[in-house]
Amino acid sequence: MHLDAFIKRLDDPAFDTNAKTDYRELTALILLLDIAVDDGRSMNLDLSDKAIEAKFDEKIEMFGATIKNIMRSIGNPGAAFISRIETKEVLELVSQRISDTLRSKPKAKQTWFDKAQGKPEEDLDSERRGMQSFISRVKEIGNGVNGQGPK
């Protein structure tokens, strides 16, 4: 099993989309390709080597991106083109399976709550002083200081 062969196969004219594309046939080809890929591993693949593992994951990402490019080339079909919609759904399903299950380890996810890597801690002293100043003015206004009462 060589991922390069599968990626190259997606460049075949059978996977091109145009006005004459038989989308049911394209769906069948994608499903057959999905079956053939299986888990994306071969007997000769040694994932204990970090360099080989990184290259394998990079090829998996390229494979998934190539399938997504086919999906994007279909465009946004209307309800009258059910075969195009079904093809896009299969392409999305296969690309998601490739991204989620074929990699040697899950892709690192970054959330809003993760600390930015390599970024120094922010100095919040000026913001803190500004907020204290603001709060003290609000308290003065709320207490009727400076001849102003609550509204």
Image (cartoon, rainbow, N blue to C red):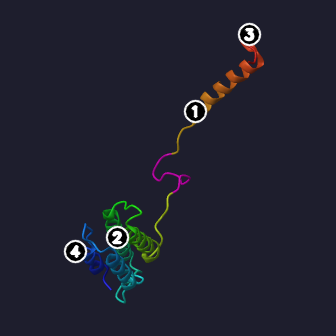
Identify whether 63 is placed above or below 47.
above
Label 3: which secondary element: helix
Amino acid on which disc 3 is placed: Gly
By secondary structure, the bulk of the magenta-drawn segment is best described as: loop
Residue 96 magenta: no
Is 97 placed left or right of 74 in the picture? right
Do the residues bearing badges 4 and 3 touch, measured as CB atoms within 8 Å? no
Q: Name the residue rendered at 36%, 83% in the picture.
A: 32
Which residue position holds label 2? 67
Residue most toward the front?
80
- Which callout, 4 or 3, points to the residue nearer the camera? 4
Amino acid on which disc 2 is placed: Ile
**Span colored in magenta:** 111-120
Which residue position holds label 3? 147
Amino acid on which disc 1 is placed: Glu
First along the sequence among labels 2 and 1: 2
Identify whether 145 is placed above or below 139.
above
Q: How crowded is mark 4: few (under 14 residues within 10 Å), some or many (20 or more)?
A: few
Asked whether the viewer can see residue 73, the reply is yes
Do the residues bearing badges 2 and 3 touch, measured as CB atoms within 8 Å? no
